[in-house]
Amino acid sequence: MSSFSASDAHTASVAAKIIQPWWVRILHWINAVAVILMIMSGWQIYNASPLFAFKFSHSITLGGWLGGALLWHFAAMWLLVVNGLIYLTLGFATGRFANKLLPLTPSGVIADTKAALTGRLSHDDLTRYNYVQKLLYAGIIVIGVVIVLSGLSIWKPVQLRWLTTLFGGYDVARYVHFICMSAIVAFLAVHVALALLVPKSLRAMIIGR
Amino acid sequence: MGRLRSLLIPGVDKRLLVKDAIKAMPDPARRRFVAGGASLGALTLLTGCDVTDSFSADDMLARISKFNDAVQAAIFNPYALAPTFPESAITKPFPVQRLLRDR
């Protein structure tokens, strides 16, 4: 009797394709927790000395007051930075950044943005990022580095005076820190919305495929 | 042997038939999500079960704060000076920092 196998080679390889490696997933979710703690405690710190004519509602801040907020902010910063440094190291060492984020061209971004806004951007192959994703994911890494550096410059403006000067002085550094936070929050809104709009991407970030 | 032979449909390529059948089956990744992903979430509930070591956020924050004090002491350079400004540079009215608990 002739035998045939039910597991086709093609089917097996498609089913086993890893979209997000385990280390990416772990670092991603640790970062998510760290960023939320940093933002919420950061808002409470801002409230103690607002830059603009508004304060963040107490219901969405962490720490209760300036002192409590600082405790949270300077605790979560370790989680953010250590996790972030591991991510940057692995991203470069494994070639993941080069693989996923390059090439990045202005014409590609414009074309994909138009496709996204008209609902014609495909999400069939989650292992390949489109130009909008490349821009935002590369951009958020840069913003992350700038927000940490500006944060250090306003935490230690005397000991790290050279860094604070790089940002244009203490007052300007505060605005840089705030603007970076706003960019991160805007990114978060888009990122979460799209993860929910394309649920298989969220699944891929949890179980990897 | 006889049962398998009765599954063979004359005129139909059995390999293509199996391929079609596999396509009709549910996405195996879905099952993997429930088995793997959702149970990972259940794992986090286990952390609430250990009551021998009561976890306090305030304790943790205080400990990290002590660690930060050590780090700041380590990077402290007594010769680093704060910048000085002319009196004309003072913002008026002066933005006093609110140190009291927000209501």
Image: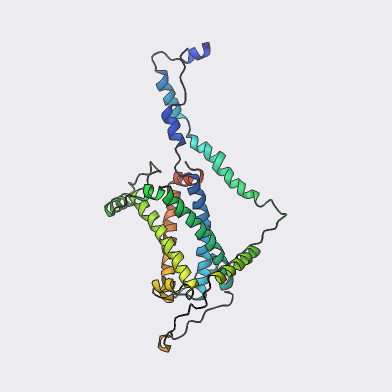
Residue at (45%, 54%) from the top-left corner? A88
Q: Residue at x 53, y 36 (%)?
A: B31
Residue B84 point in image, percent of width and height: 44, 84
| Coordinates of residue A161 in the picture (x, y in percent) | 45, 74
Given the current orientation, which residue lies at the most extreme left position? A107
Seen as rendered, the residue at the extreme top is B2
Quadrant where the C terminus of chain B is found in the figure: bottom right
Q: Position of residue A7 (x, y in %)?
A: 46, 26
Query: Which of A10 and B77 lies nearest the eye of the viewer?
Result: B77
Residue, x 50% and y 71% (percent of image)? Answer: A155
Which residue appears at 47% of the width and 24% of the height?
Answer: A6
Q: Residue furthest bottom?
A: B87
By what rule are the colours in the image chosen?
rainbow
Point out the residue furthest to the right here: B52
In terms of depth relative to the viewer, which is nearer, B14 or A165?
Answer: A165
Q: Is B35 left, or right, of A205 in this rendering?
A: right
